Image (cartoon, rainbow, N blue to C red):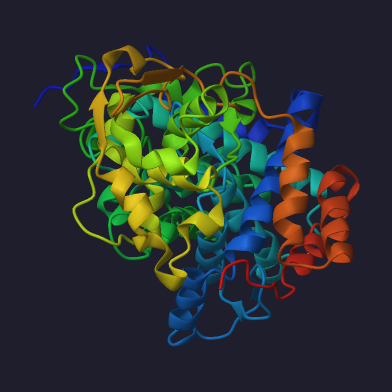
Amino acid sequence: MGYVTVQRQTGGVTAELCQWVTNLDVPQIPLKILTRAKYLVLDGIACGLVGARVPWSEKYVEATRGFEPAGDYNVIGYKDRYGPLAAAMMNATFIQACELDDYHSQAPLHSASIALATLFAAVQSQHFRPGTAHLPVSGLDFLVAAIACFETGPRVGKAVYGTDMLTRGWHSGAVFGAPAAAVAASKLFDLSPEATEDAIGMACTQACGLMSAQYEGMVKRVQHGFASRNGLLGALLARGGYEGIKKVFERQYGGYLAMFSQGNGKKVQYKENEVVHQLGEYWHTCAIRIKLYACCGLTHGTVEAIENLQREHPHLFVSENIKNIQSISIDLSEATYAHCGWEPHERPMTSTGCQMCVPYVAATQIIDRQCLLKQFSEADRNLDRDEVWDVVDKIKCAHATEFDKPDHLSASRVVVKFQDGAKVQNLVNKPRGVGEPILNEMILEKYRTLAGSVVDEAKVAEIEDAVLNLESAGNVEHLIDLLATPTGRVLD
């Protein structure tokens, strides 16, 4: 079998990535990147605090309690403690629970759910490191490890064409997240380049995630948890001297890139040099997008286009005129159309399905004029409202090739026709946060709003202070302990 690839002439990208990760230190990281990383951590924590007690997270905790023994590792929002792998899975699940967490628009994954879940467990695992006295993990060491994770996931994703994974039905973040998690834990453990390569190899052989998880059930929420667990396990084994796959990114037979790019139809099947492209020069940490709506990031262009129409043509979108809508057409990128442009064939759908479905999200924005978490609650038949489904039935999505280019993944053109002949349309090429990053001040506002809905004001302030002063923290476990406080419920 022949493979068409873009390969490096000297050395291997797996070893090069591992060497960069091992050498990465504070002086090499621009101050704005260190600062941005703190706000990404804060955003992830906000999502975890809210996500810990939504119904599907509580069901996950209940199920886990039925088989997982007690351990020494904290989870967000509970007093429960588990083993390291179970704790990492649970924390990632909470952060990803509400579709409020970050995403990357070129190589889609949810970075904070991977980095924080992995690193919280990695920090606490240092208590049990054989043959060494426990040394506290500083806030700076934690941030550097998080940045290593933030920089790795998107690069690995871009090597297999990023959004193409979604188009072909893979849950891309669960696939890209495994090596990113391995990098995070390996950096925190201060592993050698060789041991880091072992960790990545063991993470990559476990990587998986099917995007059919979006339709029914709850398991989509936990799939970034699988990635966190897989990377953490690889790093823990490597820390103990266990050896993993070498050259996992460049191997043509059975390698990570070769296998996950199978069947993509590209002239160049995969681009292994993307794994290390511009390391230390271009920082993906600032390309991680912050969500302002509680739905899949690929739907945000549609939400904003409808918001614009509601603002520009208020008389057409008053509640009493919604019944006069004749049809709505929505143009999307290839990946968004494949992932979220499907027509619902059952009613009601699960909360997950509704958050992943452009027709449902669009109808919700038209009826409720917002797409926040409460719009996707399953309580009181909220997802079976006639007024929403009447609009859903009028929506048709289509693929527009003009959006198949970098940073236009979430682009959307919405055209609304009314029975009296009126026709309005709006185009959003780049939703907020894609063209220019969401400001740190807006992330802080989002954190205070979300965290304030489930914990008291004093705790909100204490967590905020701990995160925004991580660079001066001698021991990051204080923050991890703060997050183990039981939270309230944001949904009934």
Q: Is residue 407 above or below residue 117?
A: above
Q: Is residue 425 above or below residue 250?
A: above
Residue 230, percent across and down? 44, 56
Query: Horizontally, is 312 left or right of 162 in the view?
Result: right
Residue 332, percent across and down? 32, 25
Question: Which residue corresponds to the image point at 46% horizontal and 77% vertical from the top-left?
Answer: 59
Residue 45, percent across and down? 68, 54
Question: Which residue corresponds to the image point at 56% horizontal and 16% vertical from the top-left?
Answer: 278
Q: Is residue 281 above or below residue 94?
A: above
Query: Horizontally, is 68 left or right of 353 in the view?
Result: right
Looking at the image, can residue 246 be seen?
yes
Query: Horizontally, is 266 left or right of 379 in the view?
Result: left
Taking depth in this image into account, of 448 and 328 the one nearest to the observer is 328
Taking depth in this image into account, of 132 and 483 the one nearest to the observer is 483
Residue 62, percent across and down? 48, 82
Taking depth in this image into account, of 459 and 195 the one nearest to the observer is 459
User: Split into 4 quadrants, where in the image is the C terminus?
Assistant: bottom right
Q: Quadrant of residue 283?
A: top right
For the image, the number of numbered tags is 0
- Residue sticking out furthest to the left: 1
Question: Which residue corresponds to the image point at 46% horizontal and 30% vertical from the top-left?
Answer: 316
User: Split into 4 quadrants, where in the image is the N terminus?
Assistant: top left
Looking at the image, can residue 238 be seen?
no
